[in-house]
Image: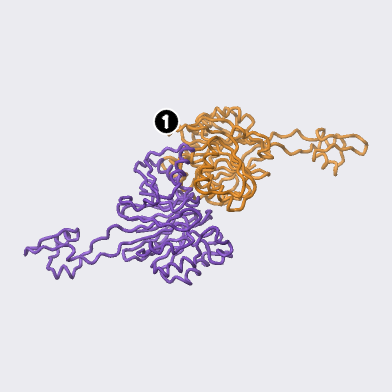
Chain colours: A orange, B purple
Amino acid sequence: MELQFLGTSSGTPTRTRNVAGLALRTAGGWVLVDCGEGTQHRILRTNHSPHDLRAIFITHLHGDHCYGLPGLLASAGLLNRTAPLAIVGPAPLERYVRGVMETTALQLPYPVEFIDVEDAARDGLLSDLAVSATPLSHRIPSYAYGFTEKAVERRLDADRLAAAGVPRGPLWGALQAGNEVTLPDGRAIRPADVLQPPRRPRRIVIAGDNDTPALLADAVRDAHVLVHEATYTEAILAKVGPGPQHSSALRVARFAREAAIPNLVLTHFSPRYQDTAGPLTLADIEAEARTEYTGNLFLARDLARHALDREGMLSESPRSQAPGA
Amino acid sequence: MELQFLGTSSGTPTRTRNVAGLALRTAGGWVLVDCGEGTQHRILRTNHSPHDLRAIFITHLHGDHCYGLPGLLASAGLLNRTAPLAIVGPAPLERYVRGVMETTALQLPYPVEFIDVEDAARDGLLSDLAVSATPLSHRIPSYAYGFTEKAVERRLDADRLAAAGVPRGPLWGALQAGNEVTLPDGRAIRPADVLQPPRRPRRIVIAGDNDTPALLADAVRDAHVLVHEATYTEAILAKVGPGPQHSSALRVARFAREAAIPNLVLTHFSPRYQDTAGPLTLADIEAEARTEYTGNLFLARDLARHALDREGMLSESPRSQAPGA
């Protein structure tokens, strides 16, 4: 499973950070979580394409999370996409998109299916991922989406195979594929007899804007990764006041520690924080988070890719290009 | 007067070209013509700001000309703009923008005034520029906007001053400022007696998508500059067919020659044309235009700036940075 950040700024884009967008790729393809203005421009700099996008999940309907949707849909049409596209999100998502389509004469050569966030967990939305949605606390309805592998690979246990006397060869392959086999001596061997205990399915939770991380307590119980906004440090949050209903790095980090989440990715930074030099920098966000959280911490950067391996460890992949906005 | 292209691609952005957007700056400030998705990202790379934007003119409501509008309005709000902003365009412009604002909870700290394109010429919209709007031919209503200087500077004629016996000094300044003066010998001198004939006010016509350049015959009669789409070459236009209702380089160039327009800027290129290397490049567009047009020809590039001097000559300013999408 791989995450690629398409935007990591809050409210407005900066010269190095776009507004919200996050690609999640699995062997089954890729899905997009949030689609701020310019997301399709970012996609041009990745290996993803609007053509093979499986579904879009919108956490909430603030512009910095959804103003790129009409343009992305239009471009997928110009690329001659014909496969249906599901868009999941809270109301009035469909009214927003249909209104834009109608007033701007946008016709698409593929069907769009709008799915209310409350139905995100319905069976079959994604073939290889189970989806969950958790309501958060923000100025408008906002949600976190959880993505959990539906199946994990079968791994043979060499010791158990030896103990059972299964000869190396085609029988191993049949057991690995999940089939019962019969040995030359007539004994039946079931896969469960010789497989390792299955690993925990990987689970990633990607949260929308939210001022109360504890609302995610249940959702992250088996999660390997939480992606959460940390719009401000505590000092700036105190200055801004609670009105915008965002989280500080401290609050998210404390929650992640208490919930024992092994990998935490912070994103959605206020444009007042510079990347490197300035009165306020992302180092402030990071330092504040580290006072609480001692797990595997990342501050998201545009176009950065993070791979989650089968052991549940997240690591940032080497970058292929500069982020220029 | 200066033009700066914010996007020069048609339909979808490419890695080097954004969709439509064009800044026109005069001593009085700047206006924006069209606002495709990502226009605010391009603005971040210029000296313009959504904060001091005077007005926005939308040629037509296709997404590649207007999907950046909600985000630009939102960002101007986050920058604490308080000055009213006029947005001019064809219906259903207001319904499009208000629909997005309502469904995405966008509240702006400044008033937006929607002006129907038919009222674009109304007095006082821009203090220093007279505006005209000309209907074009496209799949949906599309317009060209003309911007003409309302006033030209007074220039004293040294020969006439000498002939009239006006002594060099404060009297020259008073005449230049438009005041009648009395000479020491009692003679009254009016500014008109000693001024050079006024130069022709500069006029720039910026067209939206259009398959019939001749519709601009009246609008360009006194224009120094025409900015017009040249989406394809004739060969590609023949392949695509007339359905999209765009112009070829040949047709625009022929019109510009026949109308004796001194400066022609082509833009809105199909993404199939590469900047430099490829089976189809912008050199094809340029070569085709030059078979008809022998005036001052430019192919627009993102972030390129073109200054129109008082003699009506357009020239491209040296670039300050690379266009990276």
Classify mark 1: helix, strand or loop: loop
Residue B32 location, x and y as percent?
A: 40, 52
Residue in the foreground of this view, choosing between A58 and B140: B140
Quarter of the picture containing the N terminus of chain B is bottom left
The answer to which image quadrant residue A170 occupies is top right
User: Furthest residue to the right?
Assistant: A185
Give the answer, above or below, for where B89 lies relative to A154.
Answer: below
User: Furthest residue to the left?
Assistant: B185
Residue B218 location, x and y as percent?
A: 38, 63
Tell me how many marks there are: 1
Drawn side of residue B143 relative to residue A314, left or right: left
Chain for disc number 1: A
Residue in the foreground of this view, choosing between B306 and A309: B306
| Crowd rating for badge 1 (residues with CA inside 10 Å; few <14, some 14–19, many 20+) | few
Mark 1: amino acid: Gly
Residue in the foreground of this view, choosing between B11 and A231: B11
User: From this viewpoint, is residue B131 visible?
Assistant: yes
Drawn side of residue A49 relative to residue B267, left or right: right
Give the residue at mark 1: A241
Give the answer, above or below, for where A133 lies relative to B84.
Answer: above
User: From this viewpoint, is residue A315 visible?
Assistant: no
Instruction: Report the residue at 64% width, 31% height from top.
Output: A222
Residue A103 location, x and y as percent?
A: 49, 46
Residue B227 location, x and y as percent?
A: 42, 61
The answer to which image quadrant residue A151 occupies is top right
